Amino acid sequence: MSGTASTFAEIWVYLSASPLLGLTVTLLAYQAAYWIYEKAKMNPLANPVAISVAMLVALLWFTDTPYPTYFEGAQFVHFLLGPATVALAVPLYANLETLKRNLLPLAGALVAGSVTAALSAVGIGWALGASRETLLSLAPKSVTTPIAMGIAEKLGGLPSLTAVLVVTTGILGAVLARGTLNLLRVKDHAVRGFAVGIAAHGIGTARAFQVSETMGAFAGLGMGLNGMATAFLFPVLVTLWGG
């Protein structure tokens, strides 16, 4: 048994010298997690992002691999977040007429959702005695990762902490969205998608596309508009708060 462990360790040391290892491991972990998700009949509790993250954390911990070493290869996935976000405009264009009919209520939902997401997180953090730096990291938790990290860094927060909070928010949103919206008797796919996009950004949007193209398109719209509104408004609000 010890010989097998020693051989595995030697193979891992050899492979870890390649920057593409992080990319390969990431893709394999997600593929395995998605297989589990399908076997669970796409139950929200078997969210493939949560499972793949747990797999990667366990692997890095077991092999004692530093995160920067892993990220040398995984950064290619990180880079693709931008193009993937822009590509959401394609299904949105296909639902342009629905968007025009719902423009006013969607604008109201955007303001309500953005403000609630930020103030609830900051309020809870403040009540628990969090520092100003932590509160600034909490505020953009419902915005997609690249935008949220940029906002946190600009405002004086901790981008790494924000990234963890964003992923956690997305996973929880994707898991809880269906039950919550069903409880509220919200049935329209455009409304459901927009709500999920604002609350759970990219991870929620990926889940919405599995339900329907309309729901995914409006989730992408909610995610994009929430990111834009947060990026413009938060610096102003923080400046007023600091003053």
Image: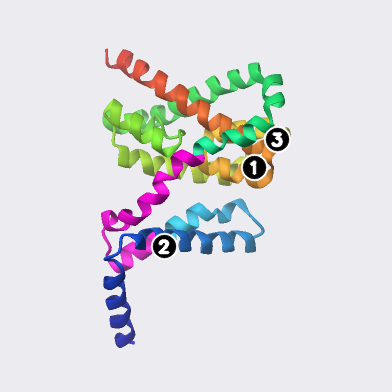
User: What residue is shown at x 61% (from left), y 31% (from top)?
Assistant: 194
Q: Amino acid at mark 2?
A: Thr
Asked if residue 63 lies in the magenta stretch, the reply is yes
* Structural crowding at the residue carrying mark 2, measured as other residues with C-alpha within 10 Å and reported as few (<14), some (14–19) or many (≥20): few
Q: Is residue 21 in the magenta section?
A: no
What residue is pinned by disc 1? Answer: 178
Q: Residues within 10 Å of mark 1 (few under 14, many from 20)?
A: some
The residue singled out by tag 3 in the image is 189
Q: Is residue 212 left or right of residue 136?
A: right
Task: Provide residue 57's location: percent of width, then percent of height.
Answer: 37, 59
- The one of 200 and 130 positioned closer to us in this rendering: 200
Tag 2 or tag 3, which sits nearer the N-term?
2
Three-letter amino acid code at disc 1?
Arg
Task: Indicate the quadrant where residue 220 lies.
Answer: top right
- State the SS at label 1: helix
Give the alpha-carbon distance from disc 3 to disc 2, as whole Å.
35 Å
Task: Measuring from the top left, give residue 203's x and y in whole percent.
Answer: 52, 44
Label 2, secondary structure: give it.
helix
What residue range appears in magenta? 56-84
Residue at image location 58% in from the left, 53% down from the top: 45
Which disc is residue 222 wearing? none
Identify the residue under disc 2.
24
Asked where in the image residue 239 lies, by quadrant, the reply is top left
Answer with left or right where residue 119 lies relative to residue 17: right
Q: Nearer the viewer, mark 3 or mark 1?
A: 3
Q: Earlier in the sequence, mark 3 or mark 1?
A: 1
Instruction: Locate the N terminus and report the quarter of the image it occupies.
Output: bottom left
Name the residue located 52 percent from the left edge and 64 percent from the top edge.
Answer: 32
Q: Amino acid at mark 3?
A: His
> Vertically, is 30 above or below 177?
below
